[in-house]
Amino acid sequence: MIVEVNTEVLKELGISSDDFLYLYLLHAKHYDLLSNLSLRPNPEDLQTKGLIKLGEELQDHTVRQDFLDMFQVPFDQMWSELLSHFPIKVHNQGHLRILRAASAEAKNNSKAKKAYERVIGEDKKKHDHIVQCLKNELELRKSTSTLGYMQMRQTGVNRHTWEQYEHKHEQPTESTGGITRTL
């Protein structure tokens, strides 16, 4: 079994990777795996933080929704949110370019949706990161009048275009008039 651990979730919840894996496996009801791994979770601390309700036996422990909400959101909801930020059409040198269908569930969006699901799965933090990168790209393109050159959603997902805009939201420092560039 492969379990991806998002370190941002660990920081936000204030838990260790052992705690995370413990909660994850407990939620997935992999009790046999829990007893075979050398994990050192702190169940009492997890209960204090509201992430688990302890029962008499391991099978009686219940993972709380606060933990699940950190990384599990229905994919369709994340897809709709992504598209709500993405332009439907742009103008490029006097021509209208259609970038995506208006409806998130349109057949025209199905390939992009499948590609996006392969990229993020159910990882809410990764989705939030991609949405922020999209916002950064839109802001930059509007300020440089290059919105007409934006990629179609499927192309952007396939090429991981968002990675180019990960740090674009950071404000440049005050300049003394010299030329500065961010690499």
Image (cartoon, rainbow, N blue to C red):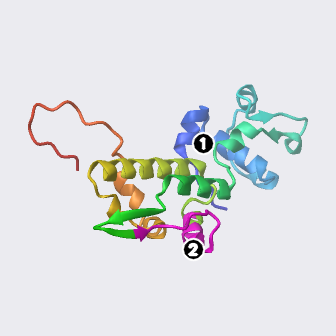
The image position of residue 106, as x and y in percent, is 62, 69
* Helix, strand or loop status at disc 2: helix
Identify the element where label 1 is drawn: helix
Location of residue 129 in the rendering, given as x and y in whole percent from the top left corner: 49, 48
Residue located beneath label 2 in the image? 108
| Residue at x 70% of width, y 50% of height | 37
What residue sits right under mark 1 in the picture? 17
Residue 2 in the image: x percent, y percent? Answer: 63, 60
x and y percentages locating residue 170 in the rendered image: 33, 39
Give residue 87's mark: none
Q: Nearer the viewer, residue 179 or 101?
A: 101
In-image side of 3 versus 157 (left or right): right
Judged from this view, the residue extending furthest toward the top is 48
Mark 1 neighbour class, 10 Å CA radius: few under 14, some 14 to 19, many 20 or more? some
The quadrant holding residue 33 is bottom right
* Residue at (44% x, 63% y) in the render: 89
